[in-house]
Amino acid sequence: MKPRPNNKPQVLIIGCGFGGLEAVRALSKSAVNITLIDRTNHHLFQPLLYQVATAGLSAPAISAPIRHILRKEMRRGNLTVLQAEVTGIDAADRSVMLDDGERIDYDHIIVAAGATHSYFGHDDWAPHALGLKTLADAFAIRARVIGAFERAERCADPIERSTWMSFVVVGAGPTGVEMAGTLSEIAQHTLSQEFRHIDSKHARVVLLEGSDRVLGSFVPELQRRAREQLKRLRVDVRTGCKVMAINDMGVSYGSREGDVDLVHHVPTHTVIWAAGVAGAPLGRTLASSAEAMLDRAGRLVVGPDLS
């Protein structure tokens, strides 16, 4: 354990998303020492990750070094920024364990570790259905999409070519809607003159949603306008769909028409998962150590003051 630099309370903040940044700024003028830990050395503007995934923006356009963002706070002399991964929390000992074995003590802790992908108990889908939470995720999706068109270009079998040129996005929340629309726009416009043997305009983008509407948390007018825009972009929107299986051959899902249950299959090698999130695994670690409760999504249950 490192010796304490003074007698001020030690505040440890895990995660440099919007919550972590706001906590640092709110506390930086107080008589405390702050240690901010994040697994990366940059803050990421996640709402625009889909633009990086589809090559609309470069990574630096939506990310910035943490120390640069907090340079004013760091000049006050009570903030330390560390790039590391917290692997354990000992609430009784008031310390955390890092991935290199180091322990860091604290008097107060703020866990703002964010969220991760949730496959609703089907973790075997993860290798076939790429999520979008990090820059690495965005680069993986970009490579998968561009690679699919390249494989289609040299594919002689028309059925297999169609499979490579089919893209499925699961989940019609903001990320799924934006991703599906942008993928279709790329196919219809950006890549339309790039290939000799395929016409990218023949690509198919399917958006699957479990509920009966897109953007379910938005007001009806925005839902309607989003649906119209997706139609103009030639996105095949299918609502009321329950995904049953995802593998390297495609997506199987169920739907109901009247009193009849139907099973459908979309052949594809490119599936993007935007259907659900869960609390970061660190929340479960803290819950176990502090004997706290988690909700169904793996998030810590807190009081009005977030404690």
Image: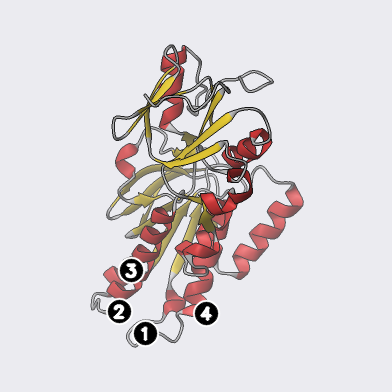
The tag earlier along the polypeptide, 2 or 4, is 2
Q: Which image quadrant: the C terminus?
A: top right
The residue where tag 2 is placed is 153
The residue where tag 4 is placed is 189
Residue depicted at x 43% and y 58%: 138
Q: Give the spatial CA distance, label 3 vs label 4.
A: 17 Å
Q: Secondary structure at mark 4?
A: helix
The residue where tag 3 is placed is 148
Say what amino acid the circle numbered 1 marks.
Phe
Say what amino acid the circle numbered 4 marks.
His
Q: Which mark is residue 195?
A: 1
Q: Give the spatial CA distance, label 1 vs label 4.
A: 12 Å
Q: Relative to 30, is 207 above or below? A: below
The tag earlier along the polypeptide, 3 or 1, is 3
Front in this rendered view, residue 105 or 92? 105
Q: Residues within 10 Å of mark 4 (few under 14, many from 20)?
A: few
Residue depicted at x 41% and y 16%: 288
Q: Secondary structure at mark 3?
A: helix
The tag earlier along the polypeptide, 2 or 3, is 3
Q: Are marks 2 and 3 in contact (CB under 8 Å)?
A: no
